[in-house]
Image (cartoon, grey):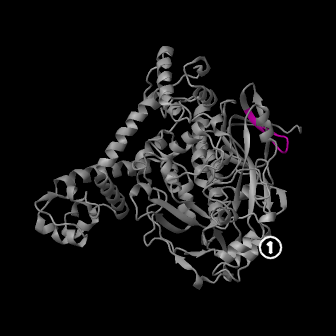
């Protein structure tokens, strides 16, 4: 090893993707001297796959990152070229924001944010080994032989750990096109007893937009009134760029099938498991042979490029097969490819080896975040990075860790799923994974989570006051609407315009708004909303939306909150680290095996482990009582200032 002088930091973050940037920024903003070690400073925050942020359930994660003081939403607002709120035709529990971004600008803004963050240094280099003292990590060894000492290390290696890129029968080392793979870290951790596995992900070809026949596709515009991703962005004033919709067809499928014998996936050259809900195009036509077409979205890569991303056409087939097949798609008959699609196979670590704080169970002060934990997606990575950065800093400061419950945030659902259930395929967030999704909406993340961001110094006083004012105005509006009474005659025109039945007698505006077809804004023309008009427009829009939702779904949300409170009592029942699951013979064999492996931190977590029955939970509660463990309040278990 070279005798390069060592350096000392409180936190070292390895990897500069979406998890790494959020981890490094949160640690530095909490006052920790932080180093972000990345293979290529020019690709910090790189959008490796599609040039978009958000989407179904993912948009909720980004809003929560923002409410806690993270950066992803602000970067999206700064680099966005099209904004859409998905699922508007359905209930508000599944509304999800999504934005197309200028890929190059997003990376530029991410890098600049890190460069300008006090307490954060960036260094180009590769971590190839870790340094330990007993069962505690004490630093990272770089490819130049330098020991960078750290009190805590956050690994956010993305797809780079022993990464292999596949295109047809061609294989090469790499974690992303044009970039090297990272070797050494996996071997180091496996040598320490960690269990690793292989996963794969893919990306579609990119095409020259000047060779697309847009007249044969369907235009997909952004929203007329775009909604910012960040609560801290007051409004968006931009010229939105359209996306375009087209489809594969039987000719496309036949052209793709010609390459199946050279497919690395079908020839079993790829051993890693791919994402179930975002399969390659060859996998789609193989698994769904009865379908004669699949959607393809043509998405602009940015304002200052003609390149387009072909969303839905992820593939690792040979290059000539890709070109032949894509030219059978309507509108792409003369298209020129600028980059071919490929698959990348990489190492990950089973996330049941982590605590709910994302600290590893085997090595103290070592945290994992992002695709190293088996997840897929920028949003899932960013959420984990933020939480790992916060908890790494709390750990070195000897403060109480921060764990979000499933009833508090999608982030809580994400991390609990990972550390409790593990994953054997790339994990993607869905609204269906959140049992309390009606109270975990994208529109109220600031109200739910801002206080946590404030506690850790990640949220500014201005944001705090904005959220507190919003909360007061919502409560005041609800009270005022209960007092406002409308005569049947006065409400008739508004109700008729909304397709709602007329009033039989005088009633409150609050009760009228319980009707699904009636909205608060409908009554503006009657002058009954004049008391709200002194508020500035963005604040009024946000309050009005909250008031409408709170009134219409009042009963559902009351029941969901009651259920969440009951489950929280199980979460508050802590399981001591010294508790010996192997000593309890009354457990079923499967439950005992799973409990020993997962080592749940709470009874609630134990109850969600596959194979642990209600009877096993009852046995656990009895033995915990004998062990002397009682209910622990929220203040002493999570999120408390040290």
Residue at image location 88% in from the left, 37% down from the top: 3
Q: Which quadrant is home to the N terminus?
A: top right
Classify 585 as above or below 519: above
Tally the numbered discs.
1
Residue at image location 60% in from the left, 41% down from the top: 389
Q: Is residue 306 magenta?
A: no
Image coordinates of residue 432 in percent, x first then y, are 48, 51
Classify 167 as above or below 433: below
Q: In this view of the protein, which residue sits in the foreground, 2 or 289?
A: 289
Residue at image location 36% in from the left, 41% down from the top: 561
Image coordinates of residue 449 in percent, x first then y, are 45, 45
Image coordinates of residue 182 in percent, x first then y, are 79, 48
Q: Is residue 473 left or right of residue 343?
A: left
Q: In this view of the protein, which residue sits in the foreground, 555 or 150?
A: 555
Classify 97 as above or below 219: above
Q: Quadrant of residue 492?
A: bottom left
Label 1: element kind: helix
Q: Is residue 145 magenta?
A: yes
Magenta stretch, main secondary structure, is strand
**Residues in magenta, as a range:** 138-147
Query: Which residue in the structure is indicated by mark 1?
Result: 320
Q: Is residue 478 left or right of residue 295?
A: left
Q: Is residue 34 left or right of residue 125?
A: left
Classify 372 as above or below 518: above
Q: In this view of the protein, which residue sits in the foreground, 162 or 22?
A: 162
Q: Is residue 144 left or right of residue 407?
A: right
Image coordinates of residue 499 in percent, x first then y, are 25, 70
């Amino acid at each position: 090893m070279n005798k390069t002088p060592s350096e000392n930091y409180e936190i070292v973050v390895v990897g500069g993707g979406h998890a790494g940037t959020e981890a490094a920024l949160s640690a530095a903003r909490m006052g920790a001297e932080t180093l972000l070690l990345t293979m290529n400073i020019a690709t910090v925050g790189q959008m490796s796959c599609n040039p978009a942020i958000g989407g179904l359930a993912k948009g909720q994660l980004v809003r929560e990152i923002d409410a806690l003081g993270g950066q992803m939403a602000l970067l999206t607002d700064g680099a966005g070229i099209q904004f859409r709120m998905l699922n508007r035709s359905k209930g508000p529990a599944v509304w999800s924001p999504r934005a197309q971004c200028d890929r190059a600008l997003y990376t530029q803004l991410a890098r600049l944010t890190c460069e300008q963050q006090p307490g954060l240094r960036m260094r180009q280099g590769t971590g190839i080994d870790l340094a330990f003292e007993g069962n505690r990590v004490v630093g990272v060894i770089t490819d130049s032989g330098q020991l960078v000492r750290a009190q805590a290390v956050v690994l956010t290696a993305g797809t780079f750990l022993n990464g292999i890129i596949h295109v047809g029968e061609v294989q090469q080392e790499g974690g992303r096109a044009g970039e090297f793979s990272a070797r050494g870290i996996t071997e180091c951790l496996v040598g320490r007893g960690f269990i690793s596995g292989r996963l794969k992900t893919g990306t579609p070809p990119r095409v020259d937009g000047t060779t697309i026949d847009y007249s044969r596709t369907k235009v997909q515009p952004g929203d007329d009134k775009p909604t910012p991703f960040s609560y801290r962005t007051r409004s968006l004033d931009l010229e939105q760029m359209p996306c375009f919709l087209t489809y594969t067809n039987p000719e496309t499928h036949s052209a793709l099938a010609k390459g199946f014998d050279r497919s690395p996936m079908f020839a079993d050259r790829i051993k890693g498991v791919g994402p179930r809900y975002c399969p390659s195009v060859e996998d789609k036509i193989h698994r769904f042979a009865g379908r004669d077409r699949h959607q393809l979205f043509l998405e602009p890569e940015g304002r200052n490029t003609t390149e387009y991303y072909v969303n839905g056409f992820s593939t690792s087939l040979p290059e000539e097969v890709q070109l032949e097949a894509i030219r059978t798609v309507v509108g792409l008959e003369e298209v020129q490819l600028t980059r071919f699609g490929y698959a990348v196979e990489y190492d990950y670590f089973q996330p049941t080896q982590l605590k709910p704080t994302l600290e590893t169970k085997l090595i103290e002060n070592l945290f994992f975040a992002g695709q190293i934990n088996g997840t897929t997606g920028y949003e899932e990575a960013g959420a984990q990075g933020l939480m790992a950065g916060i908890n790494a800093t709390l750990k070195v400061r000897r403060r109480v860790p921060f764990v979000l419950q499933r009833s508090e945030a999608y982030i809580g659902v994400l991390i609990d799923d990972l550390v409790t259930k593990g994953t054997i395929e790339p994990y993607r967030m869905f609204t269906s994974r959140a049992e309390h999704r009606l109270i975990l909406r994208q529109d109220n993340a600031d109200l739910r989570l801002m206080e946590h961001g404030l506690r850790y110094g990640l949220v500014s006083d201005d944001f705090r006051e904005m959220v507190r004012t919003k909360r007061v105005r919502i409560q005041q509006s609800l009270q005022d609407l209960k007092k406002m009474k409308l005569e049947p005659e006065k409400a008739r025109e508004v109700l008729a315009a909304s397709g709602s039945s007329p009033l039989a007698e005088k009633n409150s505006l609050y009760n009228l708004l319980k009707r699904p077809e009636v909205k608060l804004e409908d009554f503006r023309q009657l002058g009954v909303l004049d008391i709200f008009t002194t508020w500035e427009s963005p604040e009024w829009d946000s309050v009005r939306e909250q008031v409408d939702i709170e009134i219409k779904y009042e009963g559902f949300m009351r029941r969901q909150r009651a259920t969440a409170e009951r489950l929280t009592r199980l979460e508050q029942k802590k399981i001591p680290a010294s508790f010996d699951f192997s000593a309890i013979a009354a457990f079923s064999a499967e439950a005992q095996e799973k409990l020993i492996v997962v080592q749940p931190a709470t009874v609630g977590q134990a109850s969600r482990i596959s194979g642990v029955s209600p009877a096993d939970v009852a046995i656990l509660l009895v033995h915990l009582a004998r062990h002397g463990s009682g209910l622990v309040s929220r203040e002493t278990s999570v999120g408390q200032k040290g």
